[in-house]
Amino acid sequence: MNSNRKGTFQDLNALFVFGACTVLIIHILGFFIENQGDYPWDGDIEAISLILLRFGRSLFIFATGMLLFYWHQNKQMDWTRFWRKRWRVIVLPYIIWTAIFTGFQLQTINPVLLAGPFFHSLFTGSSFYHLYYIPLYLQLNVLFFLTKSLIERYMSMKVLVVLFLGQIGLYMLYQALFVDSLWSIDWTANVFLKLIQHSYVAGQNYFYMYIFTFCLGAYAGLNVEKWRLWTHRLRLVSFAATIVSAAWIMLRYLNGSKSYAESLNIFDPLYLCYTLSFLLAFYSISRYLGALPRLGQWLSRLAKQNMAIYMVHPLILFLLESYVIFRLDWSTPLIMVAMFVITPPLCIFLYEHTLISHWTRGGRPKSKPVYRMEAHKA
């Protein structure tokens, strides 16, 4: 175990916070794009902003891979403890909020009516159309469990290049099969073809669509100092690549060569290049911000609330969109900003009050450990 892993790792805090912000922004924008008649504004600006901010999940997947291998590199694992923690911190809140969302969707507390949709949402992550990331996160942990020793032994820049090309190849294959439809195939002909079709239609739910990004994080976690130096040296090139690829994506939408629906597809070679260049460019910024004394502490505290914001924000936005915003005589941009500002604190409050640990403490805040330092006698 490397000694430099002691203490708190601050490099990713700004990345986590920014990723959470992008998730919140695109869900707010999505509502207003679909309701232009009631909340008019500039549809192109809304659409382009949403399209260019759809890399939040990739940022989280990279960070997941990096932290798993950073903290556990060359370490003898206690897998029972590893999975027990994920059960307590991830799975139990996921079960609770899947139940809450299912109740809101069906507008009932009848267990007979809730049981089927609840278990379907639980295993697919389809509750409120967004909890798929939790099963995906658990898949990445299983991948870590199965491949930890192999990745530690063989992961290198050459392997990353191969994985990058392989990921692009998979996206191009799906593009040829399902988007451009170069071949006429009856996907309902047999079970094997149905499985291939399902692998594309539900691809965002499965780890193989993000394997390069996860392994990039693994490489960064295994080679932290090299990764820091590499991203610092390439930051200007990365910024330029981000601007060029973003402009290309934007122009494809504006000139009509890609529809709005097609532009939302992040499983596209160009979008993968855009996400990669942004990640490389933003990492040095995230590291710098995380090292600042006051701002770094604030980012660290907010980054720990990512699960709360991710898990609860669809409910808060649903309530605001259904019962509040239509009563406000405000401009559309002002309503967007207000929704963005008010949602995180409400998410954190509700999430904390649905944790089992909160109620087992009798609703009391978690006590902080007290550290005493005794002076050494001369």
Image (cartoon, helix red, strand yellow):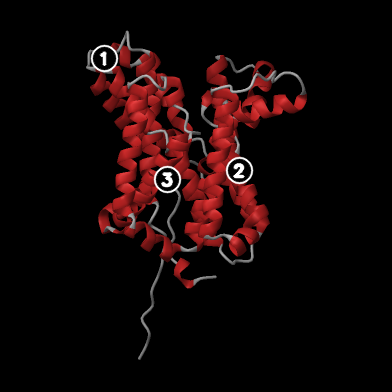
Residue depicted at x 60% and y 41%: 208
Q: Amino acid at mark 2?
A: Leu
3 or 1: tag closer to the N-terminus:
3
3 or 2: tag closer to the N-terminus:
2
Percent x, y for residue 33? 36, 17
Asked if marks 1 and 2 touch (Cβ < 8 Å), the reply is no
For residue 328, the mark is: 1
Q: Is residue 285 visible?
A: no
Closer to the camera in the image, 281 or 146: 281
38 lies above or below 180: above
Q: Amino acid at mark 1?
A: Leu
Quadrant holding the N terminus: bottom right
Closer to the camera in the image, 342 or 75: 75
Residue depicted at x 47% and y 41%: 58
Closer to the camera in the image, 83 or 349: 83
Q: CA distance from mark 3 to mark 2?
A: 23 Å
Q: CA distance from mark 1 to mark 2?
A: 41 Å
For residue 138, the mark is: 2
